[in-house]
Image (cartoon, grey):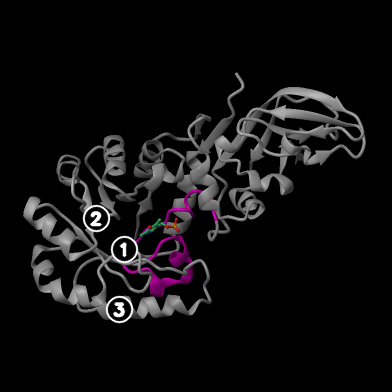
Amino acid sequence: MSTATLSIDLDAIRANWRALNEKTSGETGAVVKANAYGLGAGFVAKALLKEGVQTFFVAVAEEGVVVRKSLGNASTIYIFGGHMQGDTELIREYRLTPLLNSVDQLIRHVETLPHHPFGIQLDTGMNRLGMEPVEWHAVRELALPLNPKLIMSHLACADDPDHDMNVKQLAEFHKMTDDLDIPKSLSATGGILLGSDYHFDLTRPGVGLYGGFPFEQARAVAKVNIPIIQTREVDVGETVGYSNTWRAPTPRRIATVSAGYADGIIRAMGGKTALYAGDVACPIVGRISMDLIGVDVTLLTQPVESLELLNDRQTIDVLAENAGTIGYEILTSLGGRYQRRYLGDMG
Ligand SMILES: *Cc1c(COP(=O)(O)O)cnc(C)c1O
């Protein structure tokens, strides 16, 4: 088999959740949108349920269905995207809780599912989702008697603790919600790390659970191991891969491994990234192709069958830096071709 393996350490995800949970006195939920950042929403949600997580968040109703099927009926599953046309049956049947983002969504919800739980999402300055202050003022008196389960907003700059946007959004959130006796939520991973002023009743970590910045103490969760298909000796001056971008400065041994940009190994990371055999870093040489990558394994004294791309030392954040992106994009790009192995207590 030449398919690369993506190992997902569910115990590490649970440990990361516990570590974030210990930082706050309120409830800690878990964001499992985008298939739990690519790592498998069903498995991740179930492992976290066993850890005691009661509240989960997804982006869209269809993701909520997957999570509900995995969790059974005990937990709350919020939908950030709210209640869209066509969602009503899923919301009802799978007992999903939309976070209503607009007057239109509020009206749709009360007309189609009058007694079904919902939350409210407010915009405090990010201008992405949620009701703006004026809109909220216009509909508060309609919404409040319907007993919203949660009122939330989202921070735009929480991964930068010194950014003045954080205090601005915090002040706006207070202004819009202080007189309400409804559970409140403002913070994702970054907001948890900003301190207790930002915690309110419920936090919503995502990337920190999966081992990424800004939660620097997080345990690494994902490992990628890629089989070597073939190894060859190249002479001085020979080239490797498309467009001849790499030329051997001395005789080298080159391994061709079985993964590529179709597996989320972004072409742009090639020049700075190595694959590991234990502690030995073997640099990527030449262009990353769709399914194959050339690696300089000259330094290895023993033949190996596979090399690691993602591990405790070359984390998602290192790869992100190499590719000029963020850890979130590395994780969610990993894609469907990997053989997935779940390690730890499956819940
Ligand atoms: C994605 C998301 C989160 C989780 O953010 P992380 O930075 O991954 O912790 C929380 N809340 C909302 C509204 C989101 O869109």
Observer able to see residue 114: no
Residue at (21, 51) in percent of width and height: 84
Q: Position of residue 168 (x, y in %)?
A: 40, 80
Task: Indicate the amino acid at tag 2.
Answer: Gly
Circle 1 is placed at which residue position? 129
Find out whether the residues at labels 2 and 1 contact each other: C-beta distance under 8 Å.
yes
Q: Position of residue 255 (x, y in %)?
A: 76, 28
Left or right, 208 with reference to 320: left
Residue span colored magenta = 187-212
Q: For mark 3, give the secondary structure.
A: helix
Circle 3 is placed at which residue position? 174
Of the pair 339 and 51, the residue shown nearer to us: 339
Label 1 near ligand 1 (CB < 8 Å): yes
**Mark 1 / mark 3, whichever is N-terminal:** 1
Can you tell which quarter of the image residue 107 is in? bottom left
Is 20 situated above or below 123? Answer: above
Circle 2 is placed at which residue position? 82
Q: Nearer the viewer, mark 1 or mark 3?
A: 1
| Number of residues whose C-alpha sits closer than 10 Å to that of mark 1, classed few (under 14), some (14–19) or many (20 or more) | many
Left or right, 112 with reference to 234: left
